[in-house]
Amino acid sequence: MSEKVRIITDSGCDITRESEKEWERYLTIMPFVVTVQGKEYLDRQEITEEEIYKILKEQEEIPKHSQITQLQFEEKYRELYADGAREIIVDVIDGAGSQTFSQSVLAAENVKEELKDLKIYNVDSKNYSIHYGYPIIEACKKLSEGQSTESVVAYLEDWAEHSEAFIVGFGLKHMKKSGRISAAKSFLGELMGLKPLIMLHAEVTAVLKKARGEKAIIDTAVETVTSRMIPSTPYCLVTTTRPELEKELIEKLTKKIGYPPAYVSKCGVVVSCNAGPDFIGVFIKSKDHSLN
């Protein structure tokens, strides 16, 4: 069934395949291309999360991923328009960390004379992984309930402005090699068993806390995250290769906050290429982005 309002995102969103299937009438996920040892793969279609974790652990070379181009966005706008869409919301990976957002904006400008009755809303998520994937799923729900496109866009923009991502880092080798998470690159103390809690929002990355050992950084993360989040708001997690620590963190957050995470998914290929296979991500809504 064609819908007059559609949402486009990219494969860095880490929305589960089950959710993608459930909301396919509204949702389109455009894949990044990932290059591993000279071979290209379409994310979510030709390479899986577990495969990238194995590659990252076994190989020294950091896989690369390309941005989604202006031409690809233009083609997708035309395709959805031909299928009946007259309003398109585009909410993609953090504009400070990727040119994908700016490419989506340029594409919208380029097709506006051709597709005169198509309205395109470009939203910079200012986020990574499920922290823009989760609100997109919620946006699909809102559209299904009959909410206006403008109110859904406002919801996504508010989420972008009041969001924070946290990396509970157990191993920083890949973060440092990729160079995309600057706070990890400058972190000292690994030889002494120190583990960082890294905060990300838009162009800012910073080590907020550090603790000695994996158990200690879990407890530090719980205290820090719960002190910064807006009460009674949803929070989300992405997991990688530490099931016992992931279980412990979820249990402690649930007990401290009083309710479980709204969404948990595996960290996908794109974010793993930059953050590695050895961390847990926690995503919240916060009142401000101070580094205190």
Image: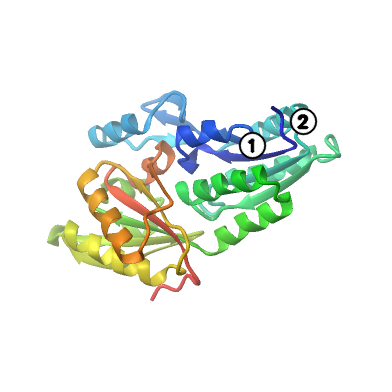
- Where's residue 162, x and y in %? 53, 64
User: With 2 as the anchor, is 272 left or right in this view?
Assistant: left
Q: Give the camera-side residue of 186 and 252.
A: 252
Q: Residue furthest bottom?
A: 292
Q: Is residue 258 left or right of residue 43?
A: left
Residue 35 drawn at (x, y percent): 42, 30
Q: Which mark is residue 26?
A: 1
N-terminal of the two: label 1 or label 2? 1
Q: CA distance from mark 1 to mark 2?
A: 12 Å
> Which amino acid type is marked by label 1?
Tyr
Q: Which quadrant is home to the C terminus?
A: bottom left
User: Which circle marks residue 9 in the picture?
Assistant: none
Which quarter of the figure has residue 235?
bottom left
Q: Which residue is mark 2?
A: 84
| Residue 5: image location, x then y, percent | 72, 40
Q: How is the image coloured?
A: rainbow
> Mark 1: few, some, or many residues within 10 Å (few <14, many ≥20)?
many
* Residue name at image x 30 percent, y 56 percent: 168
**Whole-percent x, y for residue 201 in the image:** 48, 61
Q: Residue furthest left?
A: 192
Q: Residue at x 73, y 51 (%)?
A: 148
User: Does the image show residue 178?
Assistant: yes
Indicate the amino acid at tag 2. Answer: Gly
Q: Is residue 31 visible?
A: no
Image quadrant where one finds the N terminus: top right
Seen at 36% across and 52% down, the residue is 281
Side (left or right) of 186 relative to 146: left
